[in-house]
C-alpha cells in the first residue's frame, strides 16, 4: 500500500467543461440557458411569451439560435433571440503569465485571465415586442447571473448593457434590442518537466563534423 | 382615433407613417456587430488582479 494518498481529482470536474472554457461551450451555454427559460411559462415575467414557448423543431414559438446558423428566413413571423460571441480578450498576469510557483520537481504553474462577452439580439416584428423580449432576456441574466457565475466556476458573469432598439439590416422587417452579457475567468495550467535538463552543451559535439575538417 | 381614420382610404398614408418612424431608428447589422469593450470594464476590469488562492481552483493535467 502506498503511503501517498490517491490524487484528488474532484476539483477537476467542472460544470462547464473539464478542459476549461471554450467559445463553442459558452455559446451553447447561453443557448441552453435561454431555451430553459423560454420553454416553460412559470419563469417568464412577460405574459406575451406564455403563448410562444420554445420547442425543438419548426413549431417553436420563439427561435433561439446561434448567429452562425441563423438566417432571416428562419425567423419568419415569430420573435427570436440570436446569440453572437464577441471578442475575447486575454489579460496578461505578469511578464510570464505569472509563474505562481515552482514545485519540487521543477513544474511551473501559469495563470492567464480572460474576459469575453456574448450579445443576444432580441428580434421581433414590432419595436415594442423587441423591447419586451429584450426586457425578458436582460432581467433573466441580471437576476440569475450570480448563480451562473458560481455554478460554472467563472470569476465574473453579469449583464453588461442593453442597447437601444434598432432596425436589423439583414432583415428589414425586424427590430432588434441587443443585450450584452459579459464574463471573466482564469485559465490555469501546470507545465510538467518531462525532458531531462541539459547540464552542458559541448560545442565540439554539435559541430564536430566541421571541426574535424 | 385620428391615427387610423384614413387607413382604408389612404393605405399609403399609413405606410408612409411607418416608413418615417423607421427612419429615426438606427440600423444594426448582426454580421458587423462589435461589442463596446469599454463598457465591459465594469464587469471585469483589465487592471483586475486577484489573489493566487482564487485562481488555483483548477489545473489542467
Image (cartoon, coloured by chain):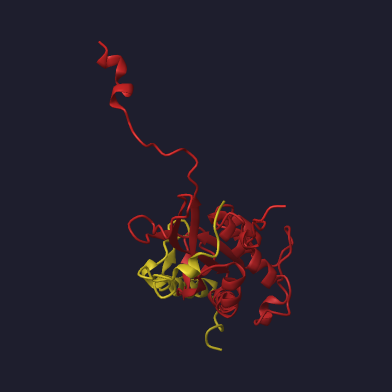
Chain colours: A red, B yellow
Residue A210 at x, y percent in the picture? 27, 15
Label count reads: 0
Q: Nearer the viewer, residue A36 or B24?
A: A36
Above-or-below relation of A187 to A44? above
Query: Which quadrant would residue A129 be assigned to in this image?
Result: bottom right
Query: Which quadrant would residue A204 be assigned to in this image?
Result: top left
Relative to residue A99, is residue A32 drawn left or right?
right
Relative to residue B1, is residue A89 drawn left or right?
left
Q: Nearer the viewer, residue A91 or A159?
A: A91
Res A88 seen here: no
Res A43 seen here: yes
Q: Nearer the viewer, residue A60 or A9?
A: A9
Residue that appears at 73% across and 60% down: A56
Residue that appears at 55% across and 75% down: A134
Residue A185 at x, y percent in the picture? 49, 65
Residue A97 at x, y percent in the picture? 39, 57
Residue furthest to the bottom in view is B1
Residue that appears at 48% across and 44% down: A193
Amino acid at each position: 500500500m502506498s503511503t501517498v494518498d490517491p490524487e484528488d481529482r474532484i476539483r477537476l470536474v467542472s460544470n462547464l467543461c473539464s478542459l476549461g472554457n471554450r467559445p463553442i461551450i459558452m455559446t451553447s451555454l447561453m443557448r441552453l440557458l435561454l431555451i430553459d427559460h423560454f420553454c416553460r411559462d412559470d419563469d417568464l415575467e412577460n405574459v406575451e411569451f406564455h403563448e410562444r414557448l420554445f420547442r425543438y423543431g419548426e413549431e417553436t414559438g420563439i427561435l433561439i439560435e446561434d448567429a452562425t446558423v441563423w438566417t432571416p428566413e428562419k425567423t419568419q413571423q415569430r420573435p427570436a433571440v440570436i446569440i453572437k460571441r464577441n471578442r475575447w480578450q486575454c489579460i496578461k498576469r505578469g511578464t510570464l503569465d505569472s509563474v505562481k510557483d515552482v514545485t519540487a520537481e521543477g513544474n511551473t504553474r501559469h495563470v492567464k485571465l480572460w474576459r469575453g462577452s456574448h450579445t443576444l439580439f432580441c428580434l421581433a416584428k414590432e419595436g415594442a415586442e423587441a423591447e419586451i423580449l429584450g426586457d425578458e432576456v436582460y432581467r433573466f441574466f441580471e437576476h440569475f447571473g450570480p448563480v451562473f457565475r458560481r455554478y460554472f466556476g467563472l470569476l465574473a458573469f453579469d449583464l453588461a448593457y442593453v442597447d437601444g432598439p434598432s432596425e436589423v439590416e439583414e432583415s428589414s422587417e425586424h427590430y432588434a434590442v441587443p443585450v450584452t452579457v459579459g464574463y471573466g475567468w482564469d485559465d490555469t495550467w501546470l507545465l510538467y518537466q518531462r525532458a531531462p535538463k541539459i547540464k552542458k552543451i559541448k560545442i565540439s559535439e554539435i559541430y564536430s563534423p566541421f571541426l574535424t575538417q | 382615433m385620428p391615427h387610423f381614420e384614413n387607413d382604408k382610404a389612404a393605405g399609403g398614408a399609413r405606410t408612409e407613417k411607418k416608413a418615417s418612424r423607421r427612419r429615426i431608428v438606427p440600423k444594426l447589422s448582426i454580421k458587423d456587430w462589435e461589442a463596446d469593450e469599454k463598457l465591459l470594464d465594469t464587469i471585469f476590469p483589465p487592471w483586475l488582479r486577484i489573489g493566487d488562492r482564487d485562481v488555483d481552483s483548477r489545473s489542467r493535467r
